[in-house]
Amino acid sequence: MTMKASSRQVDGVTIVDLSGRITLGEGSVVLRDTVKDLSTQGHKKILLNLGDVTYIDSSGIGELVSAYTSVRNAGGELKLLNLTKKVHDLLQITKLYTVFDIQDDEASAIGAFNR
């Protein structure tokens, strides 16, 4: 299954809906390019919707951390939304759960940017 990303705007927040697998190769490249393009265009509030992401490998985790870091360095914020149980457990095991701002529903996630 290939990785797909589509973005939309809601109340000044750019929501990136991701689906598929974030793995070494195409999946992590799609994530990297999408976040880089949004940052270049001046989007500062980015919400990654991972509800349809079925699997993340170690390079996918690296891409998430890299995306988070590059958005922060550009003066923006990156949050995660709708983690599946597999992805949630993976972030717990790697202790990254405490690094990312993780939200369960879109409305509260958008609200979290405006606090």
Image: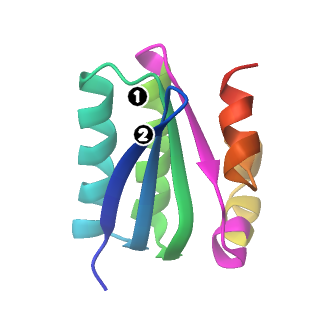
Residue at x-position 73% and y-position 31%: 111
Name the image quarter holding the C terminus.
top right
Query: Which residue, given by chain and number where applicable, does mark 1 sit on?
Result: 70
Mark 2 = which residue?
67
Q: Indicate the secondary structure of the residue bearing disc 2.
A: helix
- Give the vertical position of 109 relative to 55 (above or below): above
Q: Position of residue 88 (x, y in %)?
A: 71, 66
Where residue 91 appears, as percent x and y from the top left, is 68, 60
Residue 78 lies in the magenta stretch:
yes
> Residue type at mark 2?
Ala
Amino acid type at circle 1 is Ser
* Residue furthest out toward the front: 11
- The answer to whether residue 57 is magenta is no
Q: Give the range drawn in magenta.
A: 73-88
Badge 1 crowding class, 10 Å Cα cut-off, few under 14, some 14 to 19, many 20 or more, is: some
Foreground residue among 23 and 113? 113
Q: In which quarter of the image is residue 66?
A: top left
Residue beneath the point at 50% across and 26% down: 12
Q: Quadrant of residue 19?
A: bottom left
Give the quadrant of the N terminus: bottom left
Q: Is residue 81 above or below residue 66?
A: below
Label 2 close to label 1 by CB (< 8 Å): yes
Query: Is residue 25 in view from this perspective?
Result: no
- Please tell me whether mark 1 sits on a helix, a strand or a loop: helix
* Residue found at x 73% / y 49%: 103
